[in-house]
Image (cartoon, rainbow, N blue to C red):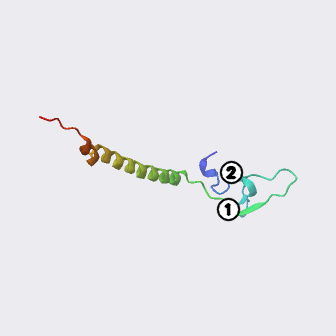
């Protein structure tokens, strides 16, 4: 099964969606034998993993920038470090 065959709304396979309206099955699966199939108002939409990955990468890059800035501040020889440095008396 390909990832583009999975609905991002219900998580169900493309084949279980309504053949005319493309509506999602209630619960993301076929109704048990003897029960009437119920349909949601949502319709089949391809799960776009590339877009999801791009969003995740953007968040991670923003976090990396924050951490790099923090490391730079800590390694820059801060005022605190200068204030506690012990100078030898000559």
| Residue at image coords 17%, 35% | 88
Q: Position of residue 72 (x, y in %)?
A: 31, 46
Q: Position of residue 57 (x, y in %)?
A: 46, 50
Checking the image for residue 90, the label placed there is none
Mark 1 / mark 2, whichever is N-terminal: 2
| Residue at image coords 64%, 54% | 7
Q: Is residue 61 shown left or right of residue 88?
A: right
Please report contact status of discs 1 and 2: CB closer than 8 Å, yes or no.
Answer: no
Depth check: 30 or 53 in front? 53
What secondary structure is found at the residue carrying circle 1? Answer: strand
**Residue extending furthest toward the right:** 34
Q: Is residue 21 above or below residue 28?
A: below
Q: Say how many tags the image has.
A: 2
Depth check: 83 or 6 in front? 83
Q: Residues within 10 Å of mark 2 (few under 14, many from 20)?
A: many
Depth check: 3 or 73 in front? 73
Quarter of the figure with the N terminus: top right
Judging by the rendered image, the residue that carries numbered circle 2 is 13
Q: Which quarter of the figure has residue 81?
A: top left
What secondary structure is found at the residue carrying circle 2? Answer: loop
| Residue at image coords 61%, 46% | 2
Q: Position of residue 66 (x, y in %)?
A: 39, 51
Q: Residues within 10 Å of mark 1 (few under 14, many from 20)?
A: some
Q: Is residue 15 shown left or right of residue 2?
A: right
Q: How far apart are labels 1 and 2 at the CA level?
A: 12 Å
| Residue at image coords 49%, 54% | 55
Judging by the rendered image, the residue that carries numbered circle 1 is 43
């Amino acid at each position: 099964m390909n990832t583009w065959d999975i609905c991002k709304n219900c998580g169900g396979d493309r084949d279980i969606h309504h053949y005319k309206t493309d509506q999602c099955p209630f619960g993301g699966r076929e109704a048990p034998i003897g029960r009437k199939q119920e349909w949601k108002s949502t319709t089949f939409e391809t799960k776009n993993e590339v877009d999801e990955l791009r969003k995740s990468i953007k968040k991670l890059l923003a976090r990396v920038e924050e951490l790099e800035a923090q490391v730079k501040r800590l390694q820059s020889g801060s005022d605190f470090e200068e204030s506690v440095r012990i100078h030898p008396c000559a």
